[in-house]
Image (spheres, rainbow, N blue to C red):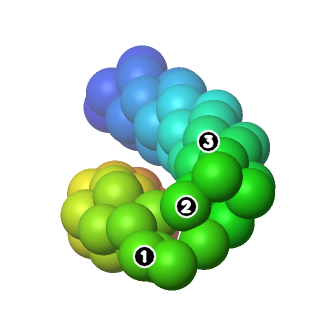
Amino acid sequence: MQNKFENHQMKVEDEKRGFRIHRTVYLCVISLLAFINLTFVPGFIWFVFPLIGWGIGLSVHYLNIRNLSKEAGNN
């Protein structure tokens, strides 16, 4: 029983680490896209499309981790 709990805790920690990496890459890439957009094509703001699309994926990733954390607390 304890081993199963420890494995679940390790999975949660791995998922949290993966989310932190995902969030960092998201912020870096969106910042770069915003810079490119505003520097070279300021008349059309297109970087919001990947910002929203990728942001949805990032939000789902966060919600998945939150759900896993709640499950770990219930065990």
Contact flag, marks 2 and 1 (Cβ < 8 Å): yes
Q: Is residue 50 left or right of residue 53?
A: right
62 lies above or below 13: below
| Residue pointed to by mark 3 | 29
Residue 25 visible in image: yes
**Where's the N terminus, which quadrant?**
top left
Residue 31 visible in image: no
Mark 1 lies on a secondary structure that is: loop
| Residue pointed to by mark 2 | 41
Label 1 packing within 10 angstroms: few (<14), some (14-19), many (20+): few
| Residue pointed to by mark 1 | 44
Q: Residue at x 43, y 30 (%)?
A: 11
Amino acid tagged 1? Phe
**Where's the C terminus, which quadrant?**
bottom left
Q: Position of residue 64 (x, y in %)?
A: 28, 59
Q: Nearer the viewer, mark 2 or mark 3?
A: 2
Q: Residue at x 39, y 67 (%)?
A: 46
